[in-house]
Amino acid sequence: MGTRIVCLYARRSEPGGSGWQRFHCQSARGGSIVPVIEALLAERGVTLRRAYDSTQQAEQLAAVVAERLGMAIAARGQATLALSGGRSPIPFLRALARHVLDWSRVRLTLVDERWVPEYDQQSNTGLLRRCLAPVFDQTQWLSLYRGVSPQHDAEQAGAELADWLPLDVVVLGMGVDGHTASFFPHAAQLTQWLAADCPDLCVASQASDGSPRLTMTGRALNSARFRLLSISGAAKLRTLCTALEENQVMRWPISAVVRAPMEIYYCPDDTQPNDVTD
Ligand SMILES: O=C1O[C@H](COP(=O)(O)O)[C@@H](O)[C@H](O)[C@H]1O
Protein backbone atom coordinates (compact mmCIF):
# COMPACT_ATOMS: atom_id res chain seq x y z
CA MET A 1 0.00 0.00 0.00
CA GLY A 2 1.47 3.33 -1.06
CA THR A 3 2.21 6.28 1.15
CA ARG A 4 -0.17 9.21 0.91
CA ILE A 5 0.66 12.59 2.40
CA VAL A 6 -2.33 14.47 3.73
CA CYS A 7 -2.09 18.23 4.13
CA LEU A 8 -5.00 20.09 5.63
CA TYR A 9 -5.55 23.68 4.61
CA ALA A 10 -7.30 26.50 6.46
CA ARG A 11 -7.78 30.17 5.75
CA ARG A 12 -5.51 32.41 7.83
CA SER A 13 -7.48 33.86 10.71
CA GLU A 14 -5.16 36.72 11.69
CA PRO A 15 -5.83 40.23 10.41
CA GLY A 16 -4.13 40.87 7.12
CA GLY A 17 -3.73 37.17 6.45
CA SER A 18 -4.43 36.01 2.96
CA GLY A 19 -4.82 32.82 1.05
CA TRP A 20 -4.70 29.34 2.44
CA GLN A 21 -2.25 28.12 5.02
CA ARG A 22 -1.13 24.53 5.26
CA PHE A 23 -1.18 23.10 8.73
CA HIS A 24 -1.01 19.79 10.53
CA CYS A 25 0.52 17.78 7.73
CA GLN A 26 0.27 14.19 8.70
CA SER A 27 0.90 10.87 7.14
CA ALA A 28 -1.88 8.64 6.04
CA ARG A 29 -1.80 4.90 6.78
CA GLY A 30 1.40 5.30 8.77
CA GLY A 31 3.26 6.77 5.79
CA SER A 32 6.27 8.99 6.10
CA ILE A 33 6.05 12.73 6.74
CA VAL A 34 9.69 13.06 5.69
CA PRO A 35 8.90 14.52 2.23
CA VAL A 36 6.70 17.17 3.86
CA ILE A 37 9.42 18.16 6.30
CA GLU A 38 12.05 18.16 3.56
CA ALA A 39 9.94 20.62 1.58
CA LEU A 40 9.40 22.86 4.61
CA LEU A 41 13.12 22.78 5.42
CA ALA A 42 14.07 23.53 1.82
CA GLU A 43 12.13 26.80 2.15
CA ARG A 44 14.55 27.66 4.98
CA GLY A 45 17.67 26.40 3.22
CA VAL A 46 18.06 23.56 5.74
CA THR A 47 18.92 19.94 4.91
CA LEU A 48 17.56 16.81 6.60
CA ARG A 49 20.01 13.92 6.93
CA ARG A 50 18.50 10.60 7.91
CA ALA A 51 20.20 7.71 9.68
CA TYR A 52 19.03 4.12 10.15
CA ASP A 53 19.57 4.12 13.90
CA SER A 54 21.00 6.16 16.74
CA THR A 55 24.47 4.65 16.30
CA GLN A 56 24.70 5.75 12.69
CA GLN A 57 23.19 9.13 13.58
CA ALA A 58 25.79 9.62 16.33
CA GLU A 59 28.64 8.72 13.98
CA GLN A 60 27.37 11.03 11.23
CA LEU A 61 26.91 13.93 13.61
CA ALA A 62 30.28 13.42 15.26
CA ALA A 63 32.00 13.28 11.86
CA VAL A 64 30.51 16.57 10.66
CA VAL A 65 31.22 18.33 13.98
CA ALA A 66 34.82 17.10 13.98
CA GLU A 67 35.23 18.17 10.35
CA ARG A 68 33.90 21.67 11.08
CA LEU A 69 36.11 22.01 14.15
CA GLY A 70 39.13 20.95 12.12
CA MET A 71 38.26 23.52 9.44
CA ALA A 72 37.94 26.27 12.06
CA ILE A 73 41.28 25.36 13.64
CA ALA A 74 42.95 25.35 10.22
CA ALA A 75 41.42 28.73 9.33
CA ARG A 76 41.65 30.61 12.64
CA GLY A 77 43.86 28.55 14.95
CA GLN A 78 40.99 27.65 17.26
CA ALA A 79 37.39 26.46 17.20
CA THR A 80 34.36 27.21 19.35
CA LEU A 81 31.77 24.52 20.01
CA ALA A 82 28.48 24.77 21.94
CA LEU A 83 26.74 21.49 22.74
CA SER A 84 23.35 20.45 24.07
CA GLY A 85 22.56 18.29 27.05
CA GLY A 86 19.58 16.12 27.92
CA ARG A 87 19.77 12.36 27.34
CA SER A 88 19.85 11.77 23.60
CA PRO A 89 23.34 13.25 22.91
CA ILE A 90 25.14 10.45 24.80
CA PRO A 91 26.08 8.27 21.77
CA PHE A 92 27.06 11.36 19.77
CA LEU A 93 29.29 12.71 22.55
CA ARG A 94 31.05 9.38 22.90
CA ALA A 95 31.55 9.21 19.14
CA LEU A 96 32.87 12.78 19.06
CA ALA A 97 35.43 12.03 21.77
CA ARG A 98 36.94 9.34 19.52
CA HIS A 99 37.86 11.87 16.84
CA VAL A 100 41.48 12.90 16.60
CA LEU A 101 41.70 16.69 16.86
CA ASP A 102 43.87 19.21 18.62
CA TRP A 103 41.33 19.46 21.43
CA SER A 104 43.43 22.05 23.24
CA ARG A 105 42.39 24.47 20.50
CA VAL A 106 38.68 23.82 21.04
CA ARG A 107 36.73 26.26 23.17
CA LEU A 108 33.81 24.28 24.54
CA THR A 109 30.56 25.29 26.21
CA LEU A 110 26.87 24.38 26.42
CA VAL A 111 23.90 25.96 24.70
CA ASP A 112 22.01 25.52 27.96
CA GLU A 113 22.39 24.23 31.46
CA ARG A 114 20.22 23.18 34.37
CA TRP A 115 21.03 25.42 37.34
CA VAL A 116 22.48 22.59 39.43
CA PRO A 117 26.03 21.72 40.46
CA GLU A 118 28.02 19.39 38.26
CA TYR A 119 27.62 16.36 40.56
CA ASP A 120 23.81 16.51 40.12
CA GLN A 121 22.55 13.89 37.63
CA GLN A 122 20.63 16.68 35.87
CA SER A 123 23.79 18.66 35.12
CA ASN A 124 24.56 18.99 31.42
CA THR A 125 28.17 19.79 32.37
CA GLY A 126 28.41 16.47 34.21
CA LEU A 127 27.04 14.73 31.12
CA LEU A 128 29.69 16.31 28.87
CA ARG A 129 32.50 15.60 31.32
CA ARG A 130 31.56 11.91 31.50
CA CYS A 131 30.79 11.32 27.82
CA LEU A 132 33.69 13.37 26.44
CA ALA A 133 36.00 12.03 29.15
CA PRO A 134 39.08 11.33 27.00
CA VAL A 135 39.16 14.89 25.62
CA PHE A 136 37.08 17.11 27.92
CA ASP A 137 40.00 18.21 30.11
CA GLN A 138 42.05 19.16 27.06
CA THR A 139 39.46 21.69 25.88
CA GLN A 140 39.06 25.29 26.99
CA TRP A 141 35.85 24.94 28.96
CA LEU A 142 33.39 27.77 29.65
CA SER A 143 30.81 26.85 32.27
CA LEU A 144 27.39 28.51 32.23
CA TYR A 145 26.75 27.40 35.82
CA ARG A 146 28.74 29.30 38.48
CA GLY A 147 26.70 28.48 41.59
CA VAL A 148 25.95 32.07 42.66
CA SER A 149 22.44 32.67 41.29
CA PRO A 150 20.85 32.01 37.89
CA GLN A 151 20.81 35.73 37.07
CA HIS A 152 24.41 36.30 38.16
CA ASP A 153 25.67 33.18 36.41
CA ALA A 154 23.88 34.09 33.17
CA GLU A 155 25.42 37.59 33.20
CA GLN A 156 28.90 36.27 33.97
CA ALA A 157 28.78 33.54 31.34
CA GLY A 158 27.28 35.95 28.79
CA ALA A 159 30.09 38.45 29.36
CA GLU A 160 32.72 35.74 28.79
CA LEU A 161 30.89 34.42 25.73
CA ALA A 162 31.15 37.79 24.02
CA ASP A 163 34.75 37.00 23.05
CA TRP A 164 33.70 33.70 21.52
CA LEU A 165 31.25 34.95 18.89
CA PRO A 166 30.57 33.93 16.27
CA LEU A 167 30.56 30.34 17.50
CA ASP A 168 31.91 27.89 14.94
CA VAL A 169 29.60 24.96 15.63
CA VAL A 170 26.38 24.74 17.64
CA VAL A 171 24.65 21.41 18.21
CA LEU A 172 21.03 21.71 19.28
CA GLY A 173 18.51 19.19 20.53
CA MET A 174 14.74 19.45 20.77
CA GLY A 175 12.13 18.21 23.21
CA VAL A 176 8.88 16.73 21.98
CA ASP A 177 7.20 19.91 23.27
CA GLY A 178 9.23 21.95 20.76
CA HIS A 179 11.68 23.43 23.25
CA THR A 180 15.29 23.82 22.25
CA ALA A 181 18.25 24.84 24.42
CA SER A 182 16.24 26.11 27.44
CA PHE A 183 13.65 28.05 25.47
CA PHE A 184 10.40 26.54 26.65
CA PRO A 185 7.00 27.18 25.03
CA HIS A 186 5.14 30.26 26.29
CA ALA A 187 7.98 31.59 28.46
CA ALA A 188 7.15 35.25 29.08
CA GLN A 189 10.41 36.63 27.66
CA LEU A 190 10.76 34.18 24.79
CA THR A 191 10.35 36.70 21.99
CA GLN A 192 12.94 39.00 23.54
CA TRP A 193 15.43 36.19 24.16
CA LEU A 194 15.11 34.91 20.60
CA ALA A 195 15.37 38.34 18.97
CA ALA A 196 18.43 39.02 16.83
CA ASP A 197 19.10 42.20 18.84
CA CYS A 198 18.72 40.66 22.31
CA PRO A 199 21.22 42.55 24.51
CA ASP A 200 22.15 39.35 26.38
CA LEU A 201 24.06 36.31 25.19
CA CYS A 202 23.00 34.12 28.12
CA VAL A 203 19.90 34.44 30.30
CA ALA A 204 18.27 32.76 33.29
CA SER A 205 15.20 30.85 32.12
CA GLN A 206 12.98 28.13 33.52
CA ALA A 207 11.91 24.70 32.35
CA SER A 208 8.20 23.97 32.09
CA ASP A 209 8.31 22.47 35.59
CA GLY A 210 9.72 25.74 36.95
CA SER A 211 13.26 24.48 37.54
CA PRO A 212 15.93 27.12 36.89
CA ARG A 213 17.92 27.00 33.67
CA LEU A 214 20.60 29.00 31.90
CA THR A 215 20.40 29.37 28.16
CA MET A 216 22.27 31.08 25.36
CA THR A 217 20.01 33.52 23.56
CA GLY A 218 18.99 33.52 19.93
CA ARG A 219 21.64 36.14 19.17
CA ALA A 220 24.40 33.79 20.32
CA LEU A 221 22.94 30.66 18.71
CA ASN A 222 21.89 32.17 15.41
CA SER A 223 25.20 33.92 14.87
CA ALA A 224 26.98 30.56 14.64
CA ARG A 225 28.89 29.71 11.48
CA PHE A 226 27.22 26.30 11.38
CA ARG A 227 24.36 24.77 13.33
CA LEU A 228 23.19 21.21 13.70
CA LEU A 229 19.98 19.86 15.15
CA SER A 230 19.79 16.28 16.32
CA ILE A 231 16.38 14.66 16.76
CA SER A 232 15.24 11.09 17.14
CA GLY A 233 11.89 9.36 17.02
CA ALA A 234 8.66 9.87 15.11
CA ALA A 235 7.11 12.04 17.84
CA LYS A 236 9.86 14.66 17.56
CA LEU A 237 9.67 14.56 13.78
CA ARG A 238 5.95 15.36 14.00
CA THR A 239 6.72 18.17 16.44
CA LEU A 240 9.26 19.60 14.03
CA CYS A 241 6.81 19.37 11.13
CA THR A 242 4.07 21.19 13.02
CA ALA A 243 6.53 23.79 14.33
CA LEU A 244 7.76 24.56 10.82
CA GLU A 245 4.25 24.82 9.45
CA GLU A 246 2.81 26.96 12.20
CA ASN A 247 5.99 29.01 12.68
CA GLN A 248 4.77 30.39 16.01
CA VAL A 249 7.76 30.98 18.21
CA MET A 250 5.83 31.21 21.48
CA ARG A 251 4.24 27.81 20.89
CA TRP A 252 7.22 26.18 19.16
CA PRO A 253 10.56 27.79 20.17
CA ILE A 254 12.40 25.41 17.83
CA SER A 255 10.91 27.28 14.85
CA ALA A 256 13.07 30.32 15.69
CA VAL A 257 16.38 28.52 15.21
CA VAL A 258 15.74 26.29 12.19
CA ARG A 259 17.39 28.38 9.52
CA ALA A 260 20.45 28.19 7.27
CA PRO A 261 23.25 27.40 7.75
CA MET A 262 21.93 24.27 9.43
CA GLU A 263 21.70 20.52 8.96
CA ILE A 264 19.26 18.30 10.84
CA TYR A 265 20.26 14.77 11.77
CA TYR A 266 17.33 12.43 12.32
CA CYS A 267 16.91 8.78 13.18
CA PRO A 268 13.62 6.98 13.84
CA ASP A 269 15.00 5.22 16.92
CA ASP A 270 14.02 7.17 20.03
CA THR A 271 15.47 4.77 22.60
CA GLN A 272 17.05 7.00 25.22
CA PRO A 273 20.22 5.92 27.00
CA ASN A 274 19.06 5.73 30.63
CA ASP A 275 22.42 5.75 32.31
CA VAL A 276 25.41 7.80 31.25
CA THR A 277 27.64 5.03 32.57
CA ASP A 278 26.14 2.53 30.05
O1 LIG B 1 16.41 19.87 28.67
C1 LIG B 1 17.01 19.67 27.65
O2 LIG B 1 16.39 18.99 26.66
C2 LIG B 1 16.75 19.16 25.29
C3 LIG B 1 16.30 17.90 24.58
O3 LIG B 1 16.94 16.78 25.21
P1 LIG B 1 16.84 15.32 24.58
O4 LIG B 1 17.59 14.40 25.48
O5 LIG B 1 15.37 15.00 24.49
O6 LIG B 1 17.46 15.39 23.21
C4 LIG B 1 18.23 19.42 25.13
O7 LIG B 1 18.50 19.77 23.80
C5 LIG B 1 18.67 20.52 26.09
O8 LIG B 1 20.05 20.81 25.92
C6 LIG B 1 18.43 20.03 27.48
O9 LIG B 1 18.86 20.93 28.47
Image: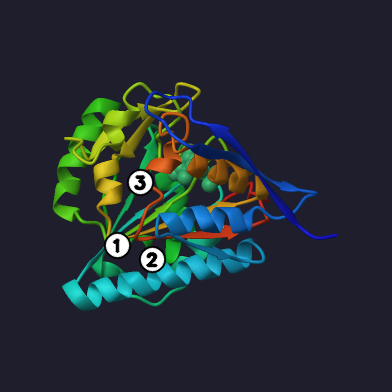
| Cα–Cα gap, marks 1 and 2 | 7 Å
- Residue 122 visible in the displayed image: no
The kind of residue on which mark 3 rests is: Val
Badge 2 vs badge 3, beta-carbon distance below 8 Å: no
Q: Which label sits on residue 135?
A: 2
Quadrant of the image occupied by residue 73: bottom left
| Cα–Cα gap, marks 2 and 3 | 19 Å
Classify the position of the C terminus by image quarter: bottom right
| Cα–Cα gap, marks 1 and 3 | 16 Å
Badge 1 vs badge 3, beta-carbon distance below 8 Å: no
- Residue that carries the numbered disc 3 in the rendered image: 111
Front-most of residues 132 and 88: 88
Give the structural element (helix, strand or loop) at label 3.
loop
Seen in the image, is 77 located left or right of residue 120? Answer: left
Badge 1 vs badge 2, beta-carbon distance below 8 Å: yes
**Residue density around tag 2, few if under 14, some if 14–19, many if 20 or more, within 10 Å:** some
The kind of residue on which mark 1 rests is: Thr
